[in-house]
Amino acid sequence: MNETMVSEDNAPLQKLLRPIIRALRTAYIQGTNVCKLMPSERAIQLYYKYRRKSYDLQWSMDPGYRKGLRKLVELVVEKGDHVLDVGCGTGSATVVAAPQAREVVGIDLSPHMIELAEEKTKKKSICNTCLFATSVEDYHPDTQFDKVISSFMIPHVKPHLRPMIYSCMFNFLKPGGLVGLFGSRGEVCDVYETREEIIENLTRSGFTDIKLYDVYDIYRIAVAKRPEKA
């Protein structure tokens, strides 16, 4: 399934600005090619130590990103869910999911991004979040989650390791739980996954009922299920 879930606004001003916004959006996404130059987790941590202040500013300029996050949560998170946000960064998806969820746990490799996420939740008076600086592989929760969400994390994972990361997400979930992924498309920027790649990687990790939704011109949401029974 490949369905456009969020399309461009057609108000006169938005239509006038659309070519500029599209150009900026594409430039931002192509900028994530820098991930290819990061040979280790330590390199990622150092990059986001200095990059973190401009991270939210960049994405705040794109209405497609904000609407994509809201659509991700709308598709995946239900009232009272226990949610894990993998690669939460500055907590953008965490704070969108929090009003709907019972609790949102956010994990990210960068302690500097976690600091910003904590500042963001405090500023918004959100009290049902827990944030940890840890890698996906080193995270061992006491309980499984109803839902797992992740946005723009996958470019930081080498392609051959992505099925392993998805397997971790699979294990974080309760049987019958959903994973929701928001990012760009590999057809636009090759540090992301193409439609075929994400289906293959999720399937290899044990997920079923995989659905893909296009958001604006370069974004994509993937939703998949951990089966009730093995």
Image: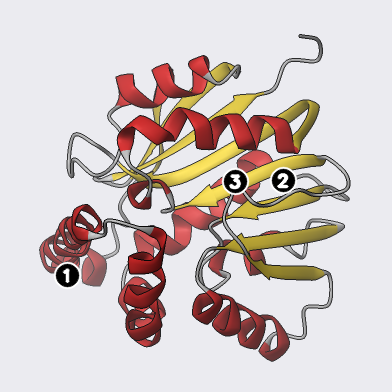
**Residue 98 place in picture, x, y as percent:** 74, 64
Label 2 sits on what residue type?
Answer: Val
Residue located beneath label 1 in the image: 17
CB atoms of marks 1 and 2 within 8 Å: no
**What is the distance, in whole Å, between disc 3 and disc 1 at their CAs?**
42 Å
Q: Which mark is residue 137?
A: 3
| Residue 119 versus residue 172 in the image, above or below | below
- Image quadrant in which you'd find residue 127: bottom right
**Residue 31 place in picture, x, y as percent:** 18, 63
Looking at the image, tell me whether mark 1 or mark 2 is earlier in sequence order. 1
Q: Residues within 10 Å of mark 1 (few under 14, many from 20)?
A: few
- Image quadrant in which you'd find residue 218: top left
| Residue 91 versus residue 170 in the image, above or below | below
Which of the two discs, 1 and 2, sits closer to the camera?
Answer: 2
Q: Which mark is residue 77?
A: 2
- Quarter of the image where the N terminus is located: top left
Callout 2: SS: loop
| Residue drawn 70% across the image and 70% down it | 131
Label 3 sits on what residue type?
Answer: Glu
